[in-house]
Amino acid sequence: MLETGYLAAFLVGLLGGVHCVGMCGGIVGVLGMGSRASLGVLLGYNLGRILSYTLAGALLGGIAALATSLADIRQAQQTLQVVAGLFMLAMGLYLGGWWFGLLKLERAGGHLWRYIEPTAQRLLPVRGAGQALLLGAVWGWLPCGLVYSVLIWSISSGGALEGGLLMLAFGLGTLPNLLAMGLAAERLRPLLQRLWVRRVAGVLVMVFGVLSIYRALLA
């Protein structure tokens, strides 16, 4: 069951790439500039970003596991999985351009980002892969509705290891879009901004949300 969850998290990251490009595409395009020499910088940035996701998932999964050990574990995990499914439904509606309620969540996270952003600014301009790694680790905390949706999912994963692996799978799913964006920014941006692409991605993410809720209710 967990392995299926990891695959689903990977696919959510892959399909949500149209949103990732919107959130991180600008800085990734600057880092990439379409040259082979910048591939190491792009990989460093994305590795740092994915490591931050993994750490966040492990922290939330571990905290939730400790909390639910004091309560009815099964019921708590079912409830959290339903909440995660609802967040994915909201994310799908957001991606498809049908509802923008998640913007409020991103704006709420922006209060924390105001304290983190100066650190990211001090790492620019990036002069090497090591510096890009640090920048990615900081940028991984950028307020993002898609990331928040999967983080809620990681809370219901059952533990720190499971939460970390879930966010790692999600982060790896976002990697192809952002790597491609860095190496071919000008050609990919118009495609990923097309309404039909965003709506197909949104519908597929909503399917995963429905499946998550369905599995939780049947458990």
Image (cartoon, helix red, strand yellow):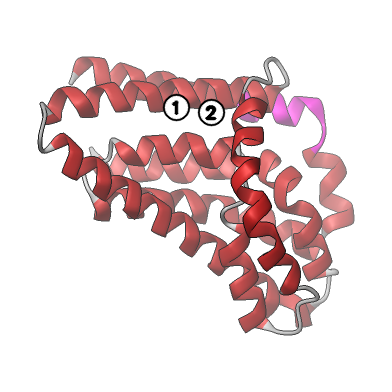
Q: In the picture, which quadrant includes the N terminus?
A: top left
Question: Which percent across, then down, holds residue 139?
Answer: 63, 59
Question: Which percent across, then down, holds residue 170?
Answer: 47, 48
Q: Is residue 9 visible?
A: yes
How crowded pointer 1 is (Cα within 10 Å; few <14, some 14-19, many 20+) is rated as: many
Question: Which percent across, then down, holds residue 87?
Answer: 48, 25
**115 magenta-colored:** no
Classify residue 215 by image quadrant.
top left
Question: Which percent across, then down, holds residue 112?
Answer: 59, 47
Query: What residue is pinned by disc 2?
Result: 205
Q: Is residue 186 left or right of residue 66?
A: right
Q: Is residue 44 visible?
A: no
Tag shown at residue 184: none
- The three-letter amino acid code for the residue at tag 2 is Val
Taking the spot 28% from the left edge, 35% from the top edge, the residue there is 156
**Mark 2 to mark 1: distance in Å?**
5 Å
Q: Is residue 67 above or below residue 78?
A: below
Residue stretch rendered in magenta on the structure: 193-204
Taking the spot 36% from the left edge, 48% from the top edge, the residue there is 166
Q: Main secondary structure of the magenta part?
A: helix
Q: Is residue 51 left or right of residue 25?
A: left
How crowded pointer 2 is (Cα within 10 Å; few <14, some 14-19, many 20+) is rated as: many
